[in-house]
Image: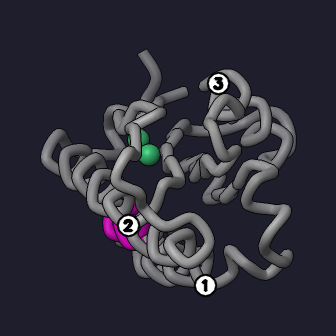
Amino acid sequence: MSKVEAFLTQQEEKEIISAIRTAEKNTSGEIRIHIESTSKVDHYERALEVFHLLKMDNTKESNAVLIYVAVHDKKFVIYGDKGINNVVDDSFWNTTKNVMQNHFKSGYFKQGIVDGILKAGEELKDHFPWQLNDEDELSNEISKG
Ligand code: CA
Ligand code: CA
C-alpha cells in the first residue's frame, strides 16, 4: 500500500469528490484527480502518462482535465486534453494553478485541491458549458498512485 492514504482523510476525500461533481455541473468537461507520493520521472511526463492510463483521452469533446499531485515532491500539474488546448491559450490554467499553490503553501492540502477543482470547472464553463444531455464520462473517484 502506498502512503497516499495518509494524505487525505475519508471525509476530505468525500469533499474532493463532491467538488468534482459540483464543478461538472457547470461544464461538459471532465475533471479527475490523481494523487501519489512521488514520481521518478518529470512530473509533466508523469501527468501525461496517468492521463492516458486513466483513459482520459476518450471523452467526446476531448475536454478532460487531470489534476496530478505528487505530494511528497510538492509538485502538481494541470493537464487538459487537446479539445481544451485548441481553444484556449497557454495561460488558461494559471488562475487555477495560483489558487492551488496559495493553499498548498499555507499547508491546506485538501482545500487546495477542492478550490482547484472548482476553479477549473468555472474556467471550463465558458468554452464547454454543461448541456442537458451531458454524461459523466469519467469517474469522479480519486485515483491514487
Ligand atoms: Ca460530463
Ligand atoms: Ca466525471
Residues 31 and 110: in front is 31
Q: CA distance from mark 3 to mark 2?
A: 22 Å
Q: CA distance from mark 2 to mark 1?
A: 17 Å
Circle 3: residue type: Lys
User: Residue drawn at (63%, 38%), measured in percent from left and top?
Assistant: 60
Residue 17 covered by magenta stretch: no
- Residue 141 pos. (x, y %): 35, 34
Q: Secondary structure at mark 2?
A: loop
Q: Secondary structure at mark 3?
A: loop
User: Residue drawn at (32%, 60%), measured in percent from left and top?
Assistant: 25
Q: Which residue is mark 1?
A: 95
Residue 26: mark? 2
* Dot 3 beta carbon under 8 Å from ligand 2: no
Number of the front mark, 3 or 2: 2
- Does residue 68 lie above or below 50 as drawn? below
Q: Which residues are magenta?
A: 111-115
Circle 2: residue type: Asn
Mark 3 or 2, nearer chain start: 2
User: Residue drawn at (66%, 59%), measured in percent from left and top?
Assistant: 78
* Dot 1 beta carbon under 8 Å from ligand 2: no
Q: Which residue is mark 3?
A: 55
